[in-house]
Amino acid sequence: MNAGSWFVLLILAAIVAWAVRDMIVNGIDSCSGECGSCGSSCKWVNDIQKAKKAAERRRKLKAFFRIGG
């Protein structure tokens, strides 16, 4: 691989890292685990335990990547 190939690879890696970070910060969905805030529009409306587990997984990912506060 020449210098141009390494440069393109570096840019692609940066774009992928930025996309992963953005998904972790903003989430794929906006479920916070606070079930009273969504009402009946929540996709987890019938399964509160799944909502809490999804929110906990997102918090662990943020902590692992040291994102957000």
Image (cartoon, grey):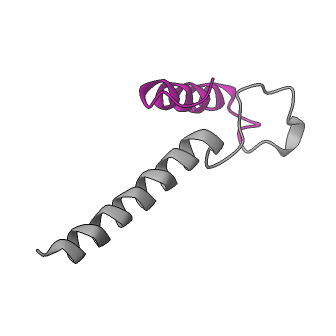
Residue 45 drawn above or below residue 6: above
From the viewer's side, name the closer residue of 27 and 1: 1
| Image location of residue 50, percent across then percent down | 60, 31
Main SS class of the magenta portion in the image: helix
Residue positioned most to the front: 3
Q: Which residues lie in the magenta part?
A: 44-69
Task: Residue at 48% x, 25% y: name it.
Answer: 60
User: Does the stretch in magenta take in 60?
Assistant: yes
State the quadrant of the N terminus: bottom left
In terms of image quadrants, where is residue 3?
bottom left
| Image location of residue 19, percent across then percent down | 50, 55
In terms of image quadrants, where is residue 13?
bottom left
**Relative to residue 32, is residue 59 drawn left or right?**
left
**Relative to residue 25, is residue 5 drawn left or right?**
left
From the viewer's side, name the closer residue of 8 and 47: 8
**Relative to residue 9, is residue 45 drawn left or right?**
right
Residue positioned most to the left: 1
Task: Residue at 79% x, 42% y: name it.
Answer: 42
| Image location of residue 21, percent across then percent down | 51, 45
State the quadrant of the C terminus: top right
User: Does the stretch in magenta take in 24?
Assistant: no
From the viewer's side, name the closer residue of 38 and 63: 63
**Relative to residue 53, is residue 29 drawn left or right?**
right
In terms of image quadrants, where is residue 65?
top left
Task: Residue at 36% x, 66% y: name it.
Answer: 12
| Image location of residue 27, percent across then percent down | 62, 44
